[in-house]
Image (cartoon, rainbow, N blue to C red):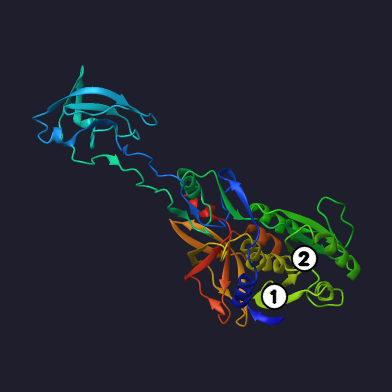
Amino acid sequence: MKKEIGFDEAQELTFSSIVARKTETLGLDRLTDRVLAEDVVSSVDSPSVNASLKDGYAVRSGDLQKAGPESPVFLEMAGSISAGAATRLKVAAGRAIRITTGAPIPQGADAVLAEEFTRLAENRLACYNTAGPGRNILQKGTDIQKGQAVAKKFDRATPPLVGLLATAGLDRATVFKSPVVCVMATGDEVVAPGKPLPEGKLYASNITEICAWLTQHRIDSRVCFARDTEEAVVSTIREQIDHVDLFISSGGIWGSEKDLMLKVLESLDWKGIYHRVRMGPGKAIAFGFLEDKPFFCLPGGPPSNEMAFLQIALPGVLKMRGHQRPRFPVVSARLAETVRGVGHWTQFVHAEVRKEEKALVVVPLQQRSRLQSMAGKNALIRIPEGTEVLDAGTLIEVQLLDTRVLREE
């Protein structure tokens, strides 16, 4: 097991170690934000016929070669056709058929004259413009051809992509299955939210926030509590291991005599990948596998717990769901105040991104209460290892935890 590794190496080891394996087939209504587990091929042509791009008249282009604003050509009306209708109507020389957008082109027609270039009087159509072959016609299979790949394995199912799959004749697709995550709190001092709080104890805010993030990503979790004994921790893990795909523990990882997580995991023959990452907060994190299931051990201090989860454990969970290199979106913003790093590790600073005069500004949150600054942030400033200061006024890249600021006016 590697120790005291750099942040970038920790992320790479996490991504390279976790593989998405389980799949499921879902209907289009449940597909959004899921990752496709296989290439998707269209079962139909779209459009399925040559179709009109305009409301107008299906015509023979040769009939209108001499049509113009001052010299209309007159055609006899021979019926009408609407989108979605099947027709046996034919366009003969000197005739036209009324047609709506999306309707199939009737036999004999090779163009559609837009309605604005016509005038209909009784059963005679005055045409004031030409319409060359193919004018205003969308050819069969122009958008999608039957057998064409419309999406690839590992593509994320965005709403537009889901719409494209429907157009391609599909009502479902195979995606990587979301893991069920065991979120385990350790320590005699931790109390479940809502229960009476004895003196000297604290509420389990760490696992509550972790579960909230998982819920936001529509990932199921199972919450459990383990007391500060080896027997209790072992028993809790054994109770959960057949029911979950991944573990996230909170606390018991720093290294004191009451920090039991690594000791317990080693007794269970886990495969440790790394312990301690040069990042702050969150450096005590450990990661490995227990019975082929990823196991993230997070430190118990709230800022360290949160940052280790956001930067390493959550991306690991999403990797198991098929996302290849999951990270928070990054935006460029002007730094409002100077921030200082440590130099020998990667430092993360809570921040708020604001729109000021249509430009993004990032303000470090350096409140007296660490918990209030955690709750008030919508972004994180990353100070890379080897960098000791980022000066005010500098344009920097910022991790955006909440993208609503980009939509605000």
Q: Position of residue 28 (x, y in %)?
A: 55, 45
Q: Amino acid at mark 2?
A: Ser
**Residue 251 location, x and y as percent?**
79, 68
Compare residues 173 and 185 and report the one nearer the observer.
173
The residue located at (65%, 75%) in the rendering is 279
Q: Quadrant of the N terminus?
A: bottom right
Q: Kindly identify which numbered label has been placed on residue 250.
A: 2
The answer to whether residue 253 is above or below residue 208 is: below
Query: Cα distance, mark 2 to mark 1?
Result: 13 Å
Marks 2/1 in contact by CB < 8 Å: the verdict is no
Residue 256 vertical position relative to residue 399 in the rendered view, above or below: below
Which of the marked residues, 2 or 1, is nearer the chain's N terminus? 2
Q: Residue at coordinates 42% horizontally, 53% vertically from top-left?
A: 148
* Residue bearing the label numbered 1: 283
Residue sitting nearer the eye, 335 or 385 = 385
Callout 1: SS: loop
The amino acid at mark 1 is Lys
Q: Residues within 10 Å of mark 1 (few under 14, many from 20)?
A: many
Q: Residue at x 34, y 33 (%)?
A: 103
The percent position of residue 194, horizontal first and vertical second, equals: 82, 50
